[in-house]
Image (cartoon, rainbow, N blue to C red):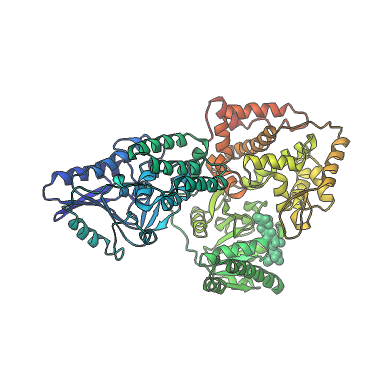
Amino acid sequence: MTAQYQVHGDVAIITLNNPPVNGLGLSTRLGITDGMAQANADAAVKSIIITGAGKAFSGGADIKEFGSPKAGQEPNLLSVISVLENSAKPVIAAIHTVAMGGGLELALGCHYRIAAPGTSVALPEVKLGLIPGAGGTQRLPRVLGVEAALNMIVSGEPVKSEMLAMLPGQKLFDKMSASAESLAEEALAFARSVADVRPLPLVRDLKCRHPQGDAYFQFARNMVKGMSKNFPAPAKCVDIVEIATKKKFDDGMAAERDIFLNLMLTSESKALRHLFLAERAASKIPDVPSDTAQRTINSIAVIGAGTMGGGIAMNFLNAGIPVKMLEMKQEALDRGVATIRKNYEAQVKKGKLKQDKYDQRMALLTTTLSYDDLSGTDMVIEAVFEEIGVKEAVFKELDRVMKPGAILASNTSTLDVDKIASFTKRPQDVVGLHFFSPANVMKLLEVVRGKETAKDVMATVMSVAKKIRKTAVVSGVCDGFIGNRMIEQYGRQGGFLLDEGCTPAQVDKAMEKFGMAMGPFRMGDLAGNDIGWAIRKRRYQEKPNMKYSKTADLLCEKGRFGQKTGAGWYDYVAGKRDAIPNAEVVTMIEEHRKALGITPRKISDEEIVQRLVFSLVNEAAHILEEGIANKASDIDIVYIFGYGFPAHRGGPMNYADQVGLFNVVQAMNRFALNPLDDAQFWKPAPLLARLAAEGKTFN
Ligand code: NAI
């Protein structure tokens, strides 16, 4: 049982004990109802305290039970709350550290609540595309007032208990303890002070009104509509809180249940729940157990103070880890440090960073021109020019100076990490850490595991990633790793679409309507079209039979590299990021089409989306089958956090699963018949074909 029962004189204490956050799994729920039965049967007990052991009152649902039959098994949370409400003896929630989701709903079912300052209080269900489902939507407005409650429910964000305690007229907390340490003592005294109160107060009996309800809810609806266009749950939060103000409590509870169950079935909620679990799963590597001993990383070095080196350094400075930057010339170091300063100063100006924090971070940064100065650092990340000869020189130096056991990482985006490892006599210590630009902003980190990378190196870098607040996904060694290998196919399809009749703006608009942060051509302009050009030139040598549209090359021959040159697929005005369609580019595409003898056709948005997204999916299926990615959900994480794939679609693999793999394969077979496309590519990857035939999914 994951809840303990104790008696202190005339007070029974039920302590939730289900680490890490006292999730309300079946055994915890049973522990509560058993404790309640025992306390009510014991004549010596006059009142009952419910509290949590360790680092939480309760974080809510037990994620280990997600999707399992146990989640709904009786006593479910609604039944537990009903046991509390119907207790003949007063029940007091003693709340500390974390009271979220079902944990807060449980507390709201108690007769009284005493809270420690510093407690994070939230109903975060909206973040999973849901509304609270155990009375939170009906009880919270009754104790906090409609507006404060709706803000919490619709944002899902935690609020500190002391802030809530200051709300005028609030009835969420009957008492605040003086400190977290004194909570237990004060809860006991409080429990004794209410032992004889009858009838016992119930949140459900409180009134729930808003003096200008119609106007307020209209306003709230408009706000929410603008902020959450792809998600149904936030609007439902407004509806259900309005119901709390208009209907009887039990009718409100029935409405909450209906809405909750309907949202559970939406593709948006499924996508968000998938991502929630996928993000947790990404940090787990099948053959590297979570108890693998880790190396100590207290300082790092960064080689190269360019675009990536500077951003990478900032991640560590932000986390309080000292960074030593090395360059070939003092000017390059000065430039790199100045850029870091400029970035931080912009944050200070915007009020996002306090001056003393800025000073602390800069104090952690040192620079050098000499490799010998790096010998004391625990880990080094190389971010020099993307040329194998330069990498070789750098890794030979690192091999010479770094202490035994130091981790040697490369930020290469295309080069072979095994080859880089072979430049050293310690390939087991070498790993790829592929950051995304801007490295201090983008959440994704591809951790590239070489043939010989040691398990403790993998375990260490995954935990370092967490420290610098990155979402890390493991990739095997291949050209482009997971993300860029897939994007190459996506880019190729984009080119074919132009040849067949689309404009860049039409393709981008279709993809942005699907939900991508940016269509492929705007993305190309942002990343720099010259990068793709360089890769294609290499491909023309390596894979002479691979089919490419030449349009992007023509664009680059005109020097239209994108935002950095003020012109790419679109035009740009200095200082702005708006993409302005350019007639010359459209003419260039038309003339190229004519030269190829292609009669343009009208291509539907649906075809655009399917060809681009399914090209990702087919390449991803190869990646999975080759073991480059450990699991399909890792690929979804790469695309959501690194490439602007819409969260409400749950990533390309989740999207394909929802469309149905049979349908995906049918579409690919159709695309293969298009003589202007690449029939060879559209042959479904064996894994995809097999799953589709068996009626299975990736995830
Ligand atoms: P960059 O050209 O902005 O910076 C490279 C820096 O390395 C320059 O400051 C240069 O002076 C320095 N450098 C060159 N050779 C050196 C050496 N032997 N010793 C010390 N310093 C040296 O390049 P960027 O964009 O920062 O790229 C660096 C690495 O990161 C490359 O491997 C690139 O493929 C990778 N990368 C780049 C991304 C991007 O979007 N720019 C994204 C992810 C990875």
Q: Is residue 460 above or below residue 620?
A: below
**Residue at the front extreme, as displayed:** 211
Figure quadrant of the N terminus: top left
Residue shown at 70%/43% (left/top)?
508
Q: Quadrant for ligand 1?
A: bottom right
Describe residue 611's horizontal placement relative to residue 25 as left or right: right
Residue shown at 39%/52% (left/top)?
145
Q: Is residue 590 above or below residue 352?
A: above
Q: Is residue 61 visible?
A: no
Image spot of residue 476 (x, y percent): 58, 47
Residue shown at 53%/25% (left/top)?
694
Among the 4 quarters of the image, the one containing residue 351 = bottom right
Q: Report the front residue among 424 and 120.
A: 120
Image spot of residue 266 (x, y percent): 50, 35
Describe residue 187's horizontal placement relative to residue 633 as left or right: left
Residue shown at 33%/45% (left/top)?
24
Q: Is residue 193 visible?
A: yes
Q: Report the front residue among 516 and 262.
A: 262
Q: Report the front residue among 232 and 15.
A: 232
Image spot of residue 191 (x, y percent): 20, 56
Image spot of residue 487 (x, y percent): 67, 44
Q: Is residue 345 above or below residue 660?
A: below
